[in-house]
Image (cartoon, rainbow, N blue to C red):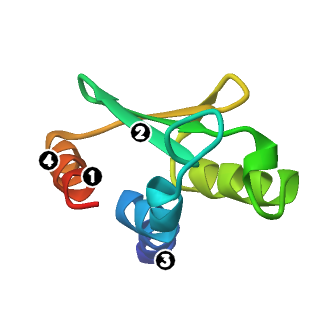
């Protein structure tokens, strides 16, 4: 049982690591959206919208890597370029602070 618990703890999606790994995309100007990754908080949900594939230096391959990273981070895929995650109250406060400091 201890091994299963440690395995689950090790591979749980980590919102902080996911957002920190994508930090530069939240501050780089986009073509279709304001930034390559646009974010908005609605209630207890964090929504992230990806810009069109041609906006990224490596094109579709880079965009697909970002999509994969968001999926591994616990985000649900909604449509072609929108990702959503429901936040706990602690995560919500951290996310608000994180985006206000960008």
Q: Is residue 72 left or right of residue 34?
A: right
User: Which residue position holds label 1?
Assistant: 99
Judged from the image, the secondary structure of the residue bearing numbered disc 3 is: helix
Q: CA distance from mark 2 to mark 1?
A: 9 Å
User: Which residue position holds label 2?
Assistant: 39
Judged from the image, the secondary structure of the residue bearing numbered disc 4 is: helix
Disc 2 and disc 3 in contact, CB within 8 angstroms: no
For the question of whether residue 41 can be seen, the reply is yes
Q: CA distance from mark 4 to mark 2?
A: 15 Å
> Can you say whether 68 is above or below 33 in the image?
below
Q: Which mark is residue 85?
A: none
Q: CA distance from mark 4 to mark 3?
A: 32 Å
Number of on-image labels: 4
Q: Residues within 10 Å of mark 4 (few under 14, many from 20)?
A: few
Q: Point out residue 73 in the picture as x, y percentages from the top left corner.
A: 52, 55
Q: Is residue 100 left or right of residue 52?
A: left
Disc 4 or 2, which lies upstream in sequence?
2
Disc 4 and disc 2 in contact, CB within 8 angstroms: no
Circle nearer the viewer, 4 or 3: 4
Disc 2 or 3, which lies upstream in sequence?
3
Q: Residues within 10 Å of mark 2 (few under 14, many from 20)?
A: some
- Report the quarter where the N terminus lies: bottom left
Quadrant of residue 56 within the rendered picture: bottom right
Judged from the image, the secondary structure of the residue bearing numbered disc 1 is: helix
> Can you say whether 35 is above or below 44 in the image?
below
Disc 2 and disc 1 in contact, CB within 8 angstroms: yes
Identify the residue at image location x=74%, y=38%. Answer: 52
Q: Residues within 10 Å of mark 1 (few under 14, many from 20)?
A: few
User: Which residue position holds label 3?
Assistant: 3
Q: Is residue 74 left or right of residue 32?
A: left
Front residue (pair 21, 25)? 25
């Amino acid at each position: 049982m201890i091994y299963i618990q440690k395995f689950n703890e090790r591979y749980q999606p980590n919102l902080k690591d996911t957002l920190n790994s994508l930090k530069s995309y939240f501050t780089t100007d986009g073509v279709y959206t304001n930034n390559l990754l646009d974010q908005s908080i609605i209630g207890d949900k964090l929504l992230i919208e990806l810009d069109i594939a041609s906006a990224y230096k490596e094109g579709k391959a880079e965009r697909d890597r970002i999509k994969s990273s968001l999926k591994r981070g616990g985000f649900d895929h909604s449509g072609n370029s929108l990702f959503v995650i429901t936040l706990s109250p602690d995560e919500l406060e951290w996310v608000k602070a994180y985006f206000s400091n960008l």
